[in-house]
Amino acid sequence: MAMNTITNILAARSQMSVSLAFHIVFASIGIALPAMVVTAELLWLRTKNQGYLRIARAWSRSMAVFFALGAVSGTVLSFELGLLFPGFMRHAGAIIGMPFSLEGFAFFTEAIFLGIYLYGWEKLKPWLHVCSGAIVALSGLASAVFVIMANAWMNAPLGFRFVNGEFIDIDPIKAMLSPFGLHEITHMLIAAYMSTAFAVAAIHAIMLRRNPGATVHRKAIFIALWFAVPCSLIQPLVGHYSGYQVAKYQPMKLAAMEGQFKTEEGAPLRIGGIIDMDEEKVKYAIEIPLGLSILATNSTKGIVHGLEEFPRVDWPHPIVHYSFQIMILVGAILFIAAAWILAGSLIRQASLHAFINDKLSRPAMAKFFLYALVLCGPLGFIAIETGWIVTEVGRQPWIIYNVLRTAETVTPMPGLVFTFVLLTLLYIGLALAATVIILRQLQQFAAMEKAAQNGIQHGTA
Amino acid sequence: MGYNMEPLSITPAEIIAGVILISLIIYSLSGGADFGAGVWNLLAAGPRAEKQNELIAKAISPIWEANHVWLILALVLLFTGFPQAYSAVSTALHIPLTIMLLGIVLRGAAFAFGHYDPNRDENQRWRRVFEISSTITPVFLGICIATIASGNLKMSGDIPAAGFFKPWLGMFQFMVGLFTLAVFSMLAAVYLTKETEDSELQNDYRVRAIGAGIAVALIGVIILSLAPDILVQSFKTPVMMITLVSGWLATLGTLLTLWHHSYGLARISAIIQVTMIVAGWGFAQYPCLVVPDITIDSAAAPDLTLKLVIAALALGAVILFPSMFWLMKIFKFNRSGY
């Protein structure tokens, strides 16, 4: 590959980062929200309570907006692989095209049944309608599985031999089964459900604060927590397994995540702190003795490889360390919140329903509970973004880990800065517009609920 | 070149190339018409302008996302089956592909926003974005296709030999861009005649379809006269002759049936016409994926990859076609005339 300028390489990487940073949010909501909508519709069919139906219909309108954004931003990515990194796709296409082809069909199924679901409320029997929604949720999940398989391969590649700059003996099936697949897929999917669910709970917590009489929001929070709580409780375990795999296959990334400069037996776990690249250490961190060795190797005597073992020019950006710390902090907060809700629902109350009603029955407690939910709202997405930075910025300077460097694959097209700025502005604009539209949808929903309440009061008076 | 006298054998690479062509034909027939509908939204006029826009929104809402996936499928099959071709095309056509991509993003986002924004005033603004991006995107799609077929796109190593502008800036490429726009608009207008029972609305789209159909024929003649020699040579093969003749007959057929208000027949004729146009492009540049240097054979991924993708396609088709049929049955077949 001809030599490329540093600016162009940086612009290509930045454009890909921005594209993924937006897509990962749109797609996560697009995966998780259908499952929640279908749950609401099922509850309506079982209980015949109209509130659940109104929730399902309101959420499905937001789902349509996010699905469209997920679809177009995903289209951008499938073009950008070639527009920005043609040298990558020339080699990798034959190896990891397989999961992308399967993803194509999953996406097809999702788009078809989304059309049926969104526009079929009056045209289909209720059970057929619910089934279409379930297919949307499942095929969205399948899409994510296939796409993450490809990313797992970039991080822990296999299924080929790299000889004299050529990829030979390609085995696409083996390439789909990267040792990074299992944890990346589970970690990402759980993150998608918990982030979306906490965000939905937060939105309805705000609406409930404004209109405490609207029981429909309690139902919405009930469904959201039903997704958020189990996911938040399992996520740290999956996270631990992820760290274990990273330590095994990408010791340089683990060292960057943890700020481990020196190779150490019985390494401590560092919490917080500031990285000093000159002195090559983490300052002001709280150190838990032996913590990192236990987490990364399951042994107090385990050796953790430090950055010193790797060429300094290859070290990942320190943002990897800070992002990792933020992700862990968010995970811990959401775990505690979920544990509190679970304990309350199982021990003090008979059910999640009873727990929510109990908390809302006392004004001071209700205020605390709802504010806590509002605070948790954006946290999941912060964890998704930071976690993704850890995985992908931490993968640099490799596009195929330890095989092919990102810089070698960038397009020779000059002036990529221009498209990078253009696309960034476009995405910011789209995200703002989507936010405004979702807010308007919520206002409309709140107003309709208010009108319905007043109608009931007038009717009984 | 004449006949190949060897026993008929199709390689896995040719099967995938064939599926890419079929995907692009279906994309033109479905997704292409959705772009065309955006054009008619822009040109909605007269006493029934508002009714026209409502009809368009109703016709494409449930299906446009699914229609869009045909393009993704073609793209994914290209980079899996022919990574070298994908890499060359996306390097050399960086600029027109990026513009097309921005159009795709704006079209999709604006349509969804306009449809789901409860604020009616804002809807108008999103609709304008939807209309303009629906008009620009097909032109650049056509320009990209024309450049691939023109023989201008040569790579020297990893860099396009003629730079990043010259290969796609030309009269032939621009005319194919306009042609794509005219074809998509014609298709949309023909379909829309069957989406309503209001005879005045039907006639609005009949007139528009005839106008677009004449434009298709005229630009078609210009394109054939501008076509580079490397493509003209292929016209003498029997397959190309059949495709060209049936394409022109169908063009005539679409116009005549529209003239006689036979909307059902017009739709069939337009579908044949567009199929022949896209297939004709494919046959004209066979066996090249990118004329003149990159062929199906030279760019093909290893056999194992190709065979696995074919297996995935077979599996996918079992799920895809019944689902697609059900979608159309719910939203399209229940209407009059179907």
Image (cartoon, grey):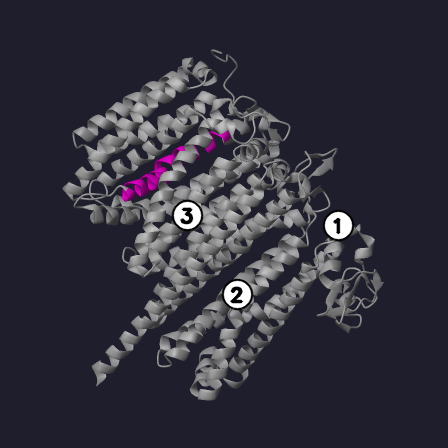
Number of residue marks: 3
Q: Tell me which amino acid carries mark 3.
A: Leu
Residue A146 in view of the camera: yes
Q: Chain of mark 2?
A: A
Q: Are marks 2 and 3 on the same chain?
A: no
Which residue is under mark 3?
B106
Q: Give me the C-alpha separation between circle 3 and circle 1.
A: 38 Å
Q: Tell me which amino acid carries mark 2.
A: Ser
Whether residue B283 is situated above or below residue B264 in the rendered picture: above
Whether residue A176 is situated above or below residue A90 in the rendered picture: below
Query: For numbered disc 3, what is the local secondary structure?
Result: helix
Q: Nearer the viewer, residue A249 or A75?
A: A75
Q: Nearer the viewer, mark 1 or mark 2?
A: 1
Query: For numbered disc 1, what is the local secondary structure?
Result: helix
Residue A41 in view of the camera: no
Q: Position of residue B248 (x, y in %)?
A: 30, 21
A84 on left or right of A140? right
Q: Nearer the viewer, residue B334 or A188?
A: A188
Which residue is under mark 1?
A314
In the image, the segment drawn in magenta is: B17-42
Which residue is under mark 2?
A195
Q: Give me the C-alpha separation between circle 2 and circle 3.
A: 27 Å
Label 1 or label 2, whichever comes before in sequence order: 2
Q: Position of residue B281 (x, y in %)?
A: 42, 25
Q: Give me the C-alpha separation between circle 1 and circle 2.
A: 32 Å
Q: Tell me which amino acid carries mark 1.
A: Asp
A454 on left or right of A252? left
What residue appears at the point 32 percent right and 57 percent down from the top-left corner? Answer: B122
B18 on left or right of B247? right
Q: Is residue B326 magenta?
A: no
